[in-house]
Image (cartoon, helix red, strand yellow):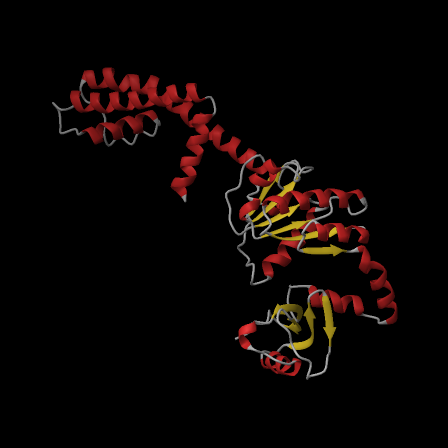
Amino acid sequence: MILRLLAQYFTTFFRKRRGQNLRAAVILTVVLLYGAAGFTYFEREVGEATFVDGLWYSLVTMSTVGYGDYFPKTPLGRFAVGVPLMFVGIGILGYVLSAVSTALVFRQSQKLRGMGKMNLKGHIVVINVPSVAKVEQVIRELRRDPTIGSDTEVVIVAEELEELPRVFHGHDVHFVKGNPTRDETLVRASIDDAAYVVILCRDPKDSASDNLNLAITLAIESRASKVISAVECIDPGMMDLLRKAKCDRIVCLSKFESRFISHELLNPGAQSLIEDLICSAGGQQLYITAIPSALQIRTYGDLSGICHASQHVLIGIRRGKEQIFNPADNTALLAGDAAVTIGERRLLFH
């Protein structure tokens, strides 16, 4: 890992003002070789000085460390080798180190400002940042699920951000700045190799955000249809268009607002109950799990027994786009059905 980072940094160093930096590196190499060869040649009369000893002396002198374990004892060794290393070598080495540090800072700055290109696989792409807190919550919820994992890397794609928010620093969250409807931006986010993409509304108060999300969905599905996509929309009328755009999951929060209010009035505590069921922070949660056809579970009653043995409460099945809650035990299960359960962790069929 360290060698790879050093290689990347020195590549950046030579790309930026390539001719000037290359000349400085060549001069530095020549001075080092001159110092090593000169020290070995002139000091051979007063001791056994090897080329490696000369190279070490040159590095120590040019870096102004001056350990004193090796030093020239002959006049020619001091004035023909030592003095040039002090005046010429120190200046050249200082320039090279300064240029390298500048390249490091430049590269890190480019990364934070979203100007780089990602090289990731199996990651999550989050598009648009309505608020930093919302994006942080989405990432946290996704990473808590064992099917995704806490170490899954995330790429945030946004046109309006100037740089990656500090709250994401050091948490395997990257940033790509650009228009998410353009292929160039999606390529820099490694969308082709992503596992999931979450498209949030850029402005939840502006219904025009739906049009942007539709365009983003079309851009993604046209080049990376295998990526599982979830899109947020404001207008329920946009859901049909998003389905036609081949979006995998659609969330329309405005559909639930009025229902939450009326349900909370008629059933006090309903909001906190639903919040607990869909929050992955801990406790019991709601899960929808595909039923493996290989198990040959024939009826709802059989499925209920299997779920109970795994300490899950079966509340229904999902069949296509339809939810069937609390059916009779003799209800036959069909291929493609999914179990709707409440449990501490995701249900695993054995």
Q: Quadrant of residue 176?
A: top right
Where the N terminus falls, by quadrant?
A: top left
| Percent coordinates x, y for residue 305 in the rendering | 62, 83
Q: Is residue 72 visible?
A: no
Residue depicted at 59% across the width and 62% down the height: 145
Q: Is residue 283 left or right of residue 20?
A: right
Residue depicted at 56% across the width and 53% down the height: 195
- Nearer to the camera, 136 or 156: 156
| Percent coordinates x, y for residue 327 in the rendering | 73, 79
Q: Is residue 26 visible?
A: yes
| Percent coordinates x, y for residue 340 in the rendering | 67, 71
Q: Is residue 40 left or right of residue 62?
A: left
| Percent coordinates x, y for residue 117 in the rendering | 54, 38
Figure check: 189 above or below 143? above
- Nearer to the camera, 1 or 89: 1
Residue sitting at the far left: 45
- Nearer to the camera, 210 or 143: 210
Q: Quadrant of residue 260?
A: bottom right
Figure check: 177 above or below 94? below
Q: How many marks?
A: 0
Figure check: 50 above or below 335? above
